[in-house]
Image (spheres, rainbow, N blue to C red):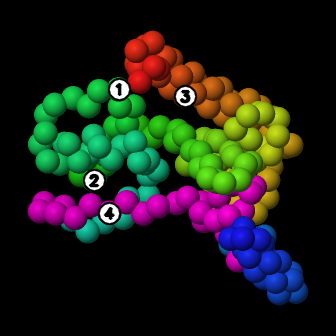
Amino acid sequence: IFFKLEEQKNQKKISIVKKMNLKPHQERNLLWYRGDLDKVLFDDNVHVPLLFYGAGLKSQIISQQVGLIDLMPTISELAEINESIPDNNGQSIVNLIQGKKIPELPIFMETSQLIQKKANVVIGIRTSRYKYFRDSEDRNKRVHLYDLKLDPFEDENVCKKFPKIINEMEKILESILNHTFDKFKKETNDDDTKK
């Protein structure tokens, strides 16, 4: 019932929005809803502000891309917890907060599944220059590539224009997926599976 009501509401909204003269990202923002079966990774939906507040931290905006994977190492360093964090691929951004440089790493992204319906889930990579995402099961379906420097609103999918960049991004994505899968295989055994 929920999905049927959401679909009816969405159809009404679509008919109103389509009559407006909007840019692609504006229309996309107005039409997006959580129950949408075609998942996407546009910044409008996934860009989350990261705020640190506390003694010794000055007010500033950092424009370098960081990821949630960097959160735990950063909090550990700020709290002066010296124990290493096992199997964390993130990096502390304390140096960045202090005005120093740190390497910018590609960020892995994925959408979440719907509970009661099969959704078209996507996975991808974001750098400060490009965002690449595609179907989570088939690398040739729902392929998106955006040049974030020239197109910060992600209005033009340039995947057909830049197959070389697609291949580079896919290699990064596969490397992350393989590392995660290998780590998962090492951490589980038959007893864990039975439990």
- Lower position in the chain sequence, tag 2 or tag 1: 1
Residue 97 numbered mark, or none: 2
Magenta run includes residue 165: no
Q: Which of 57 and 2 is in front in this view?
A: 2
Q: From which residue to which does the magenta span run? A: 30-57
Q: In this view, does 33 lie to the left or right of 158?
A: left
Residue 87 numbered mark, or none: 1
Crowd band around label 3 with a 10 angstrom C-alpha radius: few (<14), some (14–19), many (20+): some
| Element under disc 2 | helix
Name the kind of residue labelled 2 in the image.
Ile
User: Do we see residue 78 in this rendering?
Assistant: yes
Which residue occupies 26% across, 68% down?
Answer: 59
Q: Place residue 82 in its image quadrant.
A: top left
- The image shows residue 31, relative to residue 123, as above or below, that is below
- Lower position in the chain sequence, tag 3 or tag 2: 2
> Do tag 4 and tag 3 residues touch (Cβ < 8 Å)?
no
Residue linked to disc 3: 176
Magenta run includes residue 39: yes
- Lower position in the chain sequence, tag 4 or tag 3: 4
